[in-house]
Each structure stands twice: as structure tokens, then as C-alpha cells.
């Protein structure tokens, strides 16, 4: 039996998935904000390992090397690979280098450009293998990946973060951590356009909490003001973006404002998808495959693109109870599936 545990080390979350002969048996994510130090990643490994169990082989991917905890991305890749090797000592540990395959933690420094933020490559590679031709979208807490696949191969224009940003294949909007101040410069309220305050008073988790469209347990980070994760508190944070207090407007007004910000996010992702499609030219029958915590947003994008929608979980060999978790931890689940079948 081939048993593999895959890890996805992000800037604010650590995710893991367990696979046996390609079947996903479990997936989990915990908060591990790197801005508070690398020790938070170590703590997160300690929290996940008792649940996810042991395995003879562990594989890992990352995006956390971009965190400003590290002076350079190279430093981030090397230190995170070392942390993982230490935490998983006693097992075979490999680092996913995307287009370069798997490498040892000790040689990670020689493959920085291939390892850095390559988790999208694992997810898209599995979609290419299982779906053939599709537009893969993964909306996480912070960003959205947009990756065209055709003929069982990736057709992305960029590979590194810088290349993917330039190509429109990496969009900085996420369901939870996306800053409201970055979504737009102004917003409608009371029949007028109001300039937004350029401060991180609220994030997209507040928007989706007000709309009751925030998945359970999706928001694992502290709120912008350190206060409660309630609809009332989210209204107060959103009102602050317009220089107001929540009691200066009716609940219905803040609800409509939240709807507007959610619409802006959908348009942003749709624009990105249309840009990528204008270059990739996938056939109209090619579906949108959605993963991440923002699958409801992606489903709406698929509708606007007049394309079928396919959930990432339906492509996986996983039980219904695990499929949802695996979708939220798509890179880890995909990497586990790929490695356990190799």
C-alpha cells in the first residue's frame, strides 16, 4: 500500500492531506501566520501530525517563502524545507519542485524558482490528468489561481508568482484575507459614490459573513480590529471603511454594501478568467473546475462564462465527508494523490 502525506505551507495556513493508493482519506488546515515567526509553522506541524497520522513518505509544497519574515524568497524556501525535514524526521521527505519534479530538502536551494509558490502547479497537474481540458480556478483565503489545461497538459503562460501576476493567472483576491481597501477605490452608499479609507479596517471575510456566504471554519485568522467574528462586528468594520459607524446606517444598507463588494470580487475573478481564456482559447465545452474555500464564487464565475462547472472534489477519489476538506486544501490533496500514485 502506498501511503503519502502531503503538506502545503502557506503564509497564514498549514494544510495537509493523507492519501493511500491515490485515495484521499483525510485533509486538515490550521492557522500558522508566518509574520509571527517561523515557530508558528513548527507549532502547526505539531498540531496536525497527531490527526493526520504517520506515513513512510511526506511531500511538501509552499507559498510561504514570499512572507516578509524572510529577507529573500531563497531564504524562505531553504528554511521552510529545513523546518519540514526536521518536523518529519524518520520518514522520507521530498519537496515538490513543479516542473522539475521532486527534490530533497537539502537541495531545495538549488531549485528555488521551481519550488517557490508552486502549489498551484500540483493542483492544476492533477486536474489536467483527470479532466483533460478545463479552466482550473482555486480561490483560497488570499488569492485566486486561474490555470488553463488542455489535452492533459498545463497551458499556463507563467510559472513564477511574478510571471503569473503579469499573465493574469494569479489574482490577488481571496474569500477571507482579501483587503476591502484593495477591492475598489470607492463604493456606493445612500445614492452616492463614497471614497474608501485606505486602511485595513475590514476584509472579505467580513463581507461574506454579512452575506452568510462564509463557509464554516474558513476564517481562521484574527479580524482586522481583533474583535468578534459576528455579523454585527463585521458591519462595524465595513462601515469604518467609509468613515462611519454601523449605527449611522440601517442593517439593510450594510447588507447592500456587502453585496456590492462581493460583486466586485466576482467581477475581478471573471475578468481574470476572460483574460486567460482570450489567450488559451479553450473550447466552449471545457468546464471550469473549482477548488478552494471560494467555490461558490467560482461557480458563479463559471455561470457568467457560460461554461459547465465541475467541483474539484468530484474529480478526487475521496469520500463525501473528506471531499469538502480536500477541496479547501486542494494543493495538498492533489500532491498527495499524485505522489501516492507515482
Image (cartoon, rainbow, N blue to C red):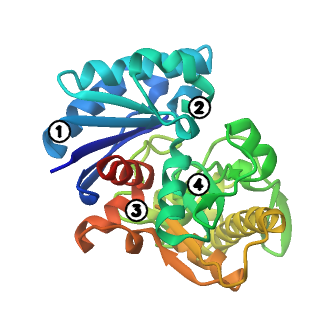
Q: Secondary structure at mark 2?
A: helix
Q: Which residue is mark 1?
A: 55
Label 1 crowd (10 A; few <14 / some 14-19 / many >=20): some
Q: Are marks 1 and 3 in contact (CB under 8 Å)?
A: no
Mark 1 in CB contact with mark 2 (< 8 angstroms)? no
Q: Residue at x 27, y 18 (%)?
A: 86
Q: Quadrant of residue 188?
A: bottom right
Identify the mark nearer the N-term, 4 or 3.
4
Q: Is residue 320 above or below residue 158?
A: below
| Residue wearing tag 3 | 327
Q: Is residue 112 left or right of residue 129?
A: right
Q: Nearer the viewer, mark 2 or mark 4?
A: 2
The answer for how far apart the CA atoms under marks 4 and 3 are is 15 Å
Which x, y percent locates residue 238?
62, 57
Q: In the rendered structure, which disc, 1 or 2, sits on the residue that comes first in sequence?
A: 1
For marks 4 and 3, give the one nearer the viewer: 3
Total of numbered circles in the picture? 4
**Label 4: few (<14), some (14–19) or many (≥20) C-alpha neighbours in 10 Å:** many
Callout in the foreground (3, 2):
2
Residue where numbered disc 2 is placed? 114
Disc 1, SS: loop
Q: Which residue is mark 4?
A: 174
Amino acid at each position: 500500500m502506498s501511503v503519502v502525506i502531503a503538506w502545503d505551507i502557506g503564509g497564514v495556513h498549514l494544510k495537509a492531506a493523507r492519501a493511500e493508493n491515490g485515495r484521499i482519506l483525510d485533509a486538515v488546515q490550521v492557522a500558522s501566520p508566518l509574520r509571527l515567526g517561523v515557530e508558528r509553522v513548527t507549532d502547526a506541524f505539531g498540531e496536525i501530525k497527531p490527526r493526520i497520522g504517520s506515513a513512510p513518505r511526506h511531500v511538501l509544497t509552499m507559498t510561504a517563502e514570499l512572507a516578509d519574515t524572510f529577507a529573500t524568497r531563497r531564504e524562505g524556501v531553504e528554511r521552510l524545507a529545513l523546518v519540514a525535514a526536521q518536523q518529519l524526521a524518520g520518514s522520507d521527505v521530498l519537496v515538490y519542485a513543479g516542473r522539475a519534479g521532486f527534490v530533497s530538502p537539502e537541495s531545495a536551494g538549488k531549485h528555488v524558482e521551481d519550488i517557490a509558490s508552486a502549489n498551484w502547479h500540483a493542483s492544476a497537474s492533477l486536474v489536467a490528468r483527470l479532466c483533460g481540458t478545463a479552466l482550473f480556478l482555486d480561490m483560497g483565503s488570499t488569492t485566486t489561481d486561474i490555470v488553463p489545461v488542455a489535452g492533459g497538459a498545463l497551458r499556463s503562460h507563467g510559472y513564477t508568482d511574478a510571471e503569473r501576476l503579469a499573465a493574469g493567472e494569479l489574482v490577488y483576491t481571496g474569500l477571507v484575507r482579501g483587503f476591502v481597501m484593495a477591492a475598489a477605490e470607492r463604493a456606493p452608499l445612500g445614492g452616492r459614490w463614497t471614497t474608501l479609507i485606505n486602511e485595513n479596517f475590514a476584509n472579505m471575510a467580513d463581507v461574506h459573513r454579512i452575506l452568510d456566504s462564509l463557509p464554516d471554519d474558513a476564517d481562521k485568522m484574527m479580524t482586522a480590529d481583533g474583535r468578534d467574528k459576528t455579523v454585527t462586528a463585521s458591519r462595524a468594520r465595513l462601515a469604518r471603511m467609509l468613515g462611519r459607524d454601523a449605527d449611522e446606517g440601517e442593517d439593510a444598507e450594510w447588507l447592500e454594501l456587502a453585496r456590492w463588494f462581493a460583486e466586485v470580487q466576482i467581477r475581478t475573478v471573471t475578468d481574470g478568467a476572460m483574460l486567460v481564456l482570450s489567450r488559451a482559447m479553450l473550447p466552449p465545452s471545457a468546464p471550469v473546475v473549482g477548488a478552494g474555500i471560494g467555490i461558490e464564487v467560482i461557480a458563479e464565475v463559471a455561470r457568467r462564462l457560460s461554461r459547465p462547472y465541475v467541483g474539484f472534489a468530484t474529480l478526487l477519489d475521496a469520500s463525501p465527508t473528506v471531499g469538502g476538506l480536500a477541496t479547501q486544501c486542494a494543493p495538498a490533496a492533489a500532491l498527495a494523490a499524485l505522489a501516492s500514485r507515482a
